[in-house]
Amino acid sequence: MAANVSIFAAPPLTNLKIPLLFFKNTSFLDFAEIHFLRQSISTGIVRSPTPRRIGSVSCTSVTDEASTFKDRPVAENEQQVQTLTWKWKGYSIRYQCAGNSGPALVLVHGFGANSDHWRKNTPILGKSHRVYSIDLIGYGYSDKPNPREFGSEPFYTFETWGEQLNDFCLDVVKDEAFFICNSIGGLVGLQAAVSKPEMCRGLMLINISLRMLHIKKQPFIGRPFIRAFQNLLRNTPVGKLFFKSIATQETVKSILCQCYHDSSQVTDELVEAILRPGLEPGAVDVFLEFICYSGGPLPEDLLPLVKCPVLIAWGEKDPWEPIDLGRAYGNFDAVEDFVVLPEAGHCPQIFGWKQTSSCRRKVETLRRLWDPPPF
């Protein structure tokens, strides 16, 4: 008979030194005291000791095609990052990893991004963890199958990406993991945690997408017009013309300056990291498919179903996902805390973010929250 077990029975995240959760070039915080995502929660989940095989892993070196960031020097407090390839259902999936001991962390990017978005975090976290950042299928340097090959059913959905994330944990990580997710990556992490709760030890959702363009959030009278516009983009040359108009260095830089708040962080290197894989064959079809994807789950649909603890962090200057709307997600039972990140925009993980007294107070809150109860 299976007994209730703690999903945090595995070794705690001891000696985790992360610059204020995930930032570079700031004062380090010793998470041995915080025990990040380690609250003791009993569930009826039975762990499967032997993961099933999904695909194959091919170890490759970083190439010009595989990464925008080459020959990056490794600092004393960082781990060397490897760029590898995993075969999933016949598709080539790029991922990056660092560290060979400690609990597993899987970093999940947002819309139009890729694993390079975590370039400042992966080598630091790898010092005390097994860290993986993955290119979701259709993004970055992963394969981009044409969505029309799958008939009338959409392929680029949170269900697809959630399945990919869980299979990645089974086949590559070979362990349960903490998911640290940004933007639409937060929906991917939630979907994965709901589909296979035994694989997810905990979730950190950073400026999760509110999906304000979801059909349920549109006025009833306007829904036919939205569908007609989506059909125009997907099935006529208008969509590819639209993509061509925004897939330029100038436009991408302008968009990034808006959503990141601090334009000094929007370097040519960052613009290249976003734009270059977006110009690969098939990227335009993925782009159009997703911006026309107005169905599927909302965060408020998935959060009540999650069995692991959730931490939500939010850049207060996010122009796309307003923090005033995001605060409502802190009320769900699974959410242990809602952390405000001052002066940060939609993707806080890219910043060399300075420590503030406000964040210090939040960190103290986390320390008290994640410390295990006395025995």
Image (tube, helix red, strand yellow):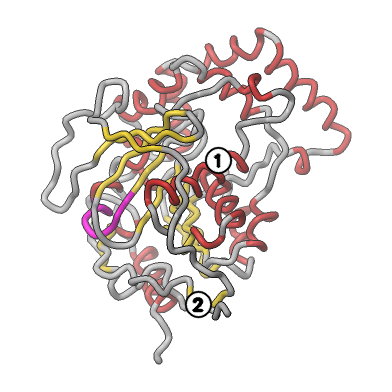
Residue 195 shown left or right of residue 231 in the figure? left
Q: Which residue is mark 1?
A: 161
The quadrant where residue 263 appears: top left
Reply yes or no: does residue 232 show up in magenta.
Answer: no
Q: Quadrant of the C terminus?
A: bottom left
The quadrant where residue 37 appears: bottom left
Give the residue type at disc 2: Val
Residue shown at 32%/34% (left/top)? 58
Residue shown at 63%/59% (left/top)? 303
Query: Which of the two residues, 85 or 233, is positioned nearer the viewer here?
Result: 85
Measured in 3D between alpha carbons, the distance from the residue under mark 1 to the one under mark 2, in whole angstroms, is 28 Å
Tell me the element at label 2. strand
Q: Taking 263 as reference, is 285 above or below it?
A: above
Q: Going from the N terminus, do you reach mark 1 or mark 2 first?
A: 2
| Label 1: few (<14), some (14–19) or many (≥20) C-alpha neighbours in 10 Å | many
Q: Which residues are magenta?
A: 124-131
Q: Quadrant of the N terminus?
A: bottom right
Residue 338 shown left or right of residue 36 in the figure? right
Reply yes or no: does residue 125 show up in magenta.
Answer: yes
Q: Can the viewer see residue 315 in this picture?
A: no
| Label 2: few (<14), some (14–19) or many (≥20) C-alpha neighbours in 10 Å | some
Q: Taking 258 as reference, is 234 above or below it?
A: above
The quadrant where residue 250 appears: top left
Q: Can the viewer see residue 23 in this picture?
A: yes
Image coordinates for residue 215, horizontal then vertical, percent:
76, 38
Image coordinates for residue 212, horizontal then vertical, percent:
67, 41
Q: Taking 242 as reference, is 160 above or below it?
A: below
Give the residue type at disc 1: Trp
Q: Which residue is mark 2?
A: 5
